Every structure is written in structure tokens, then in C-alpha cells.
Image: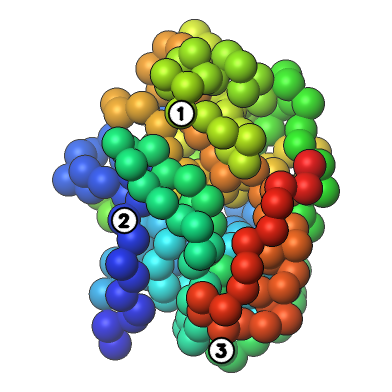
Amino acid sequence: WEGIKLSSALPRLLDTSARINRIIGGAKCPENTHPWLVLLYYFDEYYCSGTLLNEEWVVTAAHCYMRLGEHDVDAYTGNEVFSTAVDIIEHPNFTSHSNVYENDIMLLKLDPPVVFTSYVSPLSLATCSADVGTVCTVMGWGTTTTPEVPHCVDVNIISNEVCQAAYENNIIDNMVCAGVMEGGKDSCQGDSGGPLVCNGQLQGIVSWGEHPCAQPGKPGVYTDICKYLSWIKETMETPRRGSLVPLEPEC
């Protein structure tokens, strides 16, 4: 099975030959505490993460084959649920320029729909932007050369003004920055599409940042999910690629 080929490349999926392509400064996530975390497969290789929104939809940054309820990718426990993306809807205004990605969000429709269990359940969406200083958790498996289990790290919401200065005014309102300004904690290549969880809700999607990751003064940049609530709702109700008009930010 070849999976689904996508035309867009995402910055935190680049340089997959590097060995430090995973969460930096964190630790292994406690087992079965992230039932909404999705492992994405392509050509039978895993390198990307996503978040389960309901029985039929995953939100991510890119790519195709789902394996839900996963913790250790080298061990089959019977708690996993497998599904396939049968419809891919990339935001119609997704753009890339000079390694900066805007509207970096994609929805994947699953077939068959998943059945919720104690190991597989959805995560709710944040309805407003998180306050500066909020402690959030970002997680992901990284690329194939790195952990078999997802790693988690706590990071702080950074103001867009501070982030603007760090990234030469490339930060726009539908992005949110998170990290620690002294460096040492960050998401990285292979974590692309993974969740930034604040106050028990999905606040952001791992998008782009400085490479090497976790540098001082260079927080990670995430898609701010609350700016896309209407687009997500309309897309899930009318899953036809390219048929939807993007709406203005809501929060």
C-alpha cells in the first residue's frame, strides 16, 4: 500500500537523516495518557503525528496512514486501532516561503471510522488563544531513527511580539509560539503535525521553527488551532478538497 502522496512539504519533516529529530528536553510520555495522539504512516514508515478530533477526522500538518492507540511502535499490544485516510483537505491558503509556513493545517478523513476505547478517544479544540506564559505540552514520536514511544515536553506560550523579534517579523496572527527562551526544550523534525496541548485542549499544531531545534531565543512555531474553528467545522461537514472558502481568524 502506497498511502497518500501530498504535494506539500513541511519544515519539521525536513532533514530526516539527522538523528536528533524528536522532542528535545522532554521524556517518554506516560503510557496511555494520550488517547487522541495519532501516528501517521507513509510507505510503512512513521514520521509524523496528528490529533484525533472525532470518529472520522484527524487534524495534522501532513501525510497519510493512521495508527491510533499507539504507544510503542515496535510492539503490538492489541490496543491499537488502524485506519486509512480516504480524504485529504489541505487548507486552501497553505503557503510556504523562505522556510515559513502559513495556514499549515490539514484534515484527514478516516475510513473505517474508529471506535472509541479507553486507549482511543478524541481531544477537544481550544476556542481561544492561550495566555502568554501558559504551560503546555507538545508530543510526538519523531522520525524513524528516533524513539519507539512518543516523547513529551512542557513548553511555555511565548508572546507573538517576542516571537516576531526572534523570527524577523515572520509571525502572523494565526501562529502561536511556545518554548523556553533559554533553549533546550522544543519539538523538532518528525514531530510535525503533532499536538500542542494547553489546558487539556488542542491549542496548536507543530509547524516550523529554527534548525537545529531548541536554540536559545528561538521557540517553536505552531498553527493556532482556534483561528481555524469555522474552517474545520465546514470542512468536516463538506469534505471536498478545495471547495471551501477560508474564513477570517476567530480569536
Mark 3, residues whose alpha carbon is within 10 Å: few (<14), some, or many (≥20)? some
Q: Residue at x 78, y 48 (%)?
A: 250
Q: Quadrant of residue 174?
A: top right
Q: Residue at x 74, y 58 (%)?
A: 229
As drawn, the label of residue 201 is none
Label placed on residue 170: 1
Q: CA distance from mark 2 to mark 1?
A: 18 Å
Disc 2 + disc 1, Cβ < 8 Å: no
Residue 125 placement (x, y as % from top left): 76, 54
Closest to the camera, between mark 2 and mark 1, is 1
Rounded to the nearest angstrom, the CA distance separating label 3 from label 1 is 37 Å
Amino acid residing under circle 1: Asn
**Tag 1 secondary structure:** loop
As drawn, the label of residue 111 is 3
Specify the farthest residue to the bottom: 112
- In the image, residue 74 sits, relative to residue 135, either above or below, namely below
Q: Nearer the viewer, residue 220 or 29?
A: 220
Q: Is residue 155 left or right of residue 19?
A: right
Q: Which residue is mark 2?
A: 9
Q: Are marks 3 and 1 in contact (CB under 8 Å)?
A: no
Helix, strand or loop at mark 3: strand
Q: Along the polypeptide, which appears first: circle 3 or circle 1?
A: 3
Secondary structure at badge 2 equals loop
| Mark 3: amino acid | Asp
Q: Is residue 28 above or below residue 157?
A: below
